[in-house]
Image: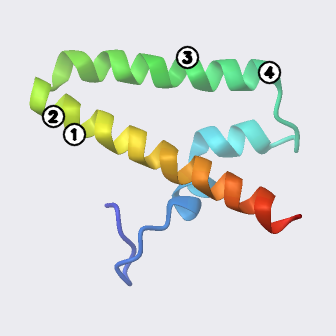
Amino acid sequence: MFFDENGILDLDGMVCESPSFKKILEDGLVTEEELKEQSDKIIGILHDMEKQYCEEELRAIKNLLVETSVLYAAYQQFSIQSNR
């Protein structure tokens, strides 16, 4: 589910295969409306998860979200540094 056949966590591949990502990029432009829709979708999923999972599971999910966001931000910073 999380790793490919080689044991690699291919987040980029998962994102590219996501129907949400494909829909957002189908015209080659990302609009404020599309960002808002995606943000609302995430908020809805998180509210659903709060109802479905116990505190311990929610802490693990929160930690994963935070650490994934740290990785994304670090990649962005690295990319900016590399282009200097």
Q: CA distance from mark 2 to mark 1?
A: 5 Å
User: Dot 4: what SS?
Assistant: helix
Residue nearest the observer in this picture, 79 or 37: 79
> Which of the two labelled residues, at mark 4 and mark 3, occupies the earlier sequence position?
4
Q: CA distance from mark 1 to mark 4?
A: 30 Å
User: Dot 2: what SS?
Assistant: helix
Contact flag, marks 4 and 3 (Cβ < 8 Å): no
Q: For the residue marked with disc 4, what is the amino acid?
A: Glu
Q: Is residue 74 above or below residue 31?
A: below
> Which of the two labelled residues, at mark 3 and mark 1, occupies the earlier sequence position?
3
> Which of the two labelled residues, at mark 1 and mark 4, occupies the earlier sequence position?
4
Residue neighbourhood size for the residue with mark 4, other residues' Cα within 10 Å, grouped as few (<14), some (14–19), many (≥20): few
Furthest-bottom residue in this view: 6
Q: CA distance from mark 3 to mark 2?
A: 22 Å
State the residue position of label 4. Answer: 32
State the residue position of label 2. Answer: 57
Q: CA distance from mark 4 to mark 3?
A: 12 Å
Residue neighbourhood size for the residue with mark 1, other residues' Cα within 10 Å, grouped as few (<14), some (14–19), many (≥20): few
State the residue position of label 3. Answer: 40
Q: Is residue 55 left or right of residue 8?
A: left
Q: Is residue 73 above or below residue 57?
A: below
Q: Residue at x 21, y 29 (%)?
A: 58
Contact flag, marks 3 and 2 (Cβ < 8 Å): no
